[in-house]
Image: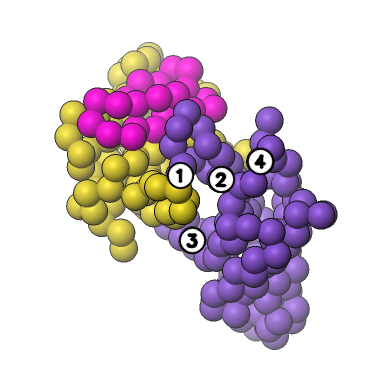
Amino acid sequence: GNSVTQMEGPVTLSEEAFLTINCTYTATGYPSLFWYVQYPGEGLQLLLKATKADDKGSNKGFEATYRKETTSFHLEKGSVQVSDSAVYFCALSDNYGGSQGNLIFGKGTKLSVKP
Amino acid sequence: DAGITQSPRHKVTETGTPVTLRCHQTENHRYMYWYRQDPGHGLRLIHYSYGVKDTDKGEVSDGYSVSRSKTEDFLLTLESATSSQTSVYFCAISGGGADNSPLHFGNGTRLTVT
């Protein structure tokens, strides 16, 4: 079945460091790929998405490119801030029972950014 | 915020008791979902709804039932709570459609079964 594997955390970085969180997937067909972010005490929020191969999603300085040849969707940011501290989830769409909106999530990667 | 309210926000209950969690939306979205979040597991889909009175099972549906009698409300019921159902429960909504309309999440309900 479809699945998402993302790097285990926690990841601890200093402010202004470069961030990469790896995400690979297994899927049949052509799923859409997503990154969601969860701040403490809150629900998940969509950070960015890509719907087809070679698409690049971007938002708030974060980027991820849909690589079909390597089945990857790694999240990157050039210079992290303390406010980026959160848990990041990679996800893919799965046409589950006819619905287009169901998602399969990775286990999440906790990022802590130190001043 | 996407107009999603979960209630209660926190609940402590005893093993064997029934529990109902409520999700209320003001967006008139067609799709509603219940997920549970557990350390080391990420989020897992429990049940979802694609319209009033139309529901289906997700990955971890055993021990849970749902109902949707109105577009705006989606209820999750644990008929007889067990300790393994201690978790944080998230409701999500989506407009659906072929463009994979993103999910919007509520702030969660933390349930503890003692």
Point out which mark residue B13 bears.
none
Q: Measuring from the top left, give residue B16's x and y in whole percent.
A: 38, 14
- Total marks shown come to 4
Q: Measuring from the top left, give residue B26's x and y in whole percent.
A: 20, 52
Please tell me which of labels 3 and 2 falls first in the chain: 3
Q: Is residue B56 above or below residue A19?
A: above
Q: Which residue is mark 1?
A: A101
Within 10 angstroms of label 2, few (less than 14), some, or many (20 or more) residues?
many
Q: Secondary structure at mark 2?
A: strand
Q: Which residue is mark 4?
A: A29
Looking at the rendered structure, the kind of residue marked 3 is Leu
**Which marked residue is nearer to the observer: mark 1 or mark 4?**
4
Q: Which residues are magenta?
A: B46-66
Please tell me which of labels 4 and 3 falls first in the chain: 4
Residue at left offset 42%, top offset 53% = B101
Q: Secondary structure at mark 3?
A: strand
Main SS category, magenta section: strand
Q: Is residue A80 above or below residue B104?
A: below
Disc 1 to disc 4, how far (Cα)? Answer: 15 Å
Q: Is residue A8 visible?
A: no
Disc 3 to disc 2, how far (Cα)? Answer: 13 Å
Chain identifier matching the yellow colour in the rendered picture: B
* Circles 1, 4 touching at the beta carbon (< 8 Å): no
Disc 3 to disc 1, how far (Cα)? Answer: 13 Å
Q: Secondary structure at mark 4?
A: loop
Q: Which residue is mark 2?
A: A93
Chain designation of label 1 = A
Chain designation of label 3 = A
Within 10 angstroms of label 1, few (less than 14), some, or many (20 or more) residues?
many
The stretch drawn in magenta includes residue B47? yes
Q: Name the quadrant containing residue A3.
A: top right
